[in-house]
Image (spheres, rainbow, N blue to C red):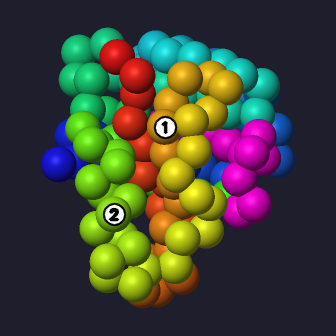
Amino acid sequence: MTHRIVPNLNVDDASTGHEFYEEFLGLKKEFDMGWIASFRSPTHPGAQVSLVSGDASAPEQSAMSVHVHDVEAAYADALRRGYEIVHPLTTEPWGVRRFFVRDPHGVVVNVVAHAD
């Protein structure tokens, strides 16, 4: 089950322009790993956006991240449906388990679950 969708804005340098999101839009920086920075509304946690300048381990950039409760079930469902897996189900060093899948329009979607 999906519980959050976050647009991933593909930018040249994810370590810059943060004041726009923090000061102008009033978002709070959730994390900054250099190649990705994510900002969330302090009052509406579902409102979030990420800046991505080069995914650390995936072969392609994703257009959005879909946060799910059971990433293994989502992965099995994507395989069953015959969708193209762009990045296999992986536990990343920064603590998420994810895979990338291509939608029918060619858009790459990061399907992710956090180890909470």
- Give the foreground label among 1 and 2: 2
Q: Identify the residue shown where x is 38% and y is 59%.
A: 75
Mark 2, residue position: 76
In this orientation, which residue lies closer to the viewer: 33 or 111? 111
Q: Is residue 28 shown left or right of residue 62?
A: left
Check disc 1 and give the amino acid type.
Answer: Arg
Q: Which residues are magenta?
A: 49-60
Seen in the picture, residue 17 relative to 13 is either above or below; the reply is: above
Seen in the picture, residue 76 relative to 84 is either above or below; the reply is: above
Q: Main secondary structure of the magenta part?
A: loop
User: How crowded is the residue under tag 2: few (<14 C-alpha within 10 Å), some, or many (20+)?
Assistant: few
* Lower sequence index among marks 1 and 2: 2
Residue 31 seen in the current view: yes
Mark 2 residue element: helix
Check disc 2 and give the amino acid type.
Answer: Ala
Residue 7 seen in the current view: no
In this orientation, which residue lies closer to the viewer: 93 or 13? 93
Position of residue 87 measured from the top left corner of the image (x, y, whole percent): 62, 60
Position of residue 33 measured from the top left corner of the image (x, y, whole percent): 71, 22
Mark 1, residue position: 97
Residue 54: say if magenta: yes
Seen in the picture, residue 15 relative to 62 is either above or below; the reply is: above
User: How crowded is the residue under tag 1: few (<14 C-alpha within 10 Å), some, or many (20+)?
Assistant: some
Residue 10: say if magenta: no
**Residue reaching furthest right?**
12
Mark 1 residue element: strand
In this orientation, which residue lies closer to the viewer: 59 or 22? 59
Q: Identify the residue shown where x is 50% and y is 16%.
A: 30
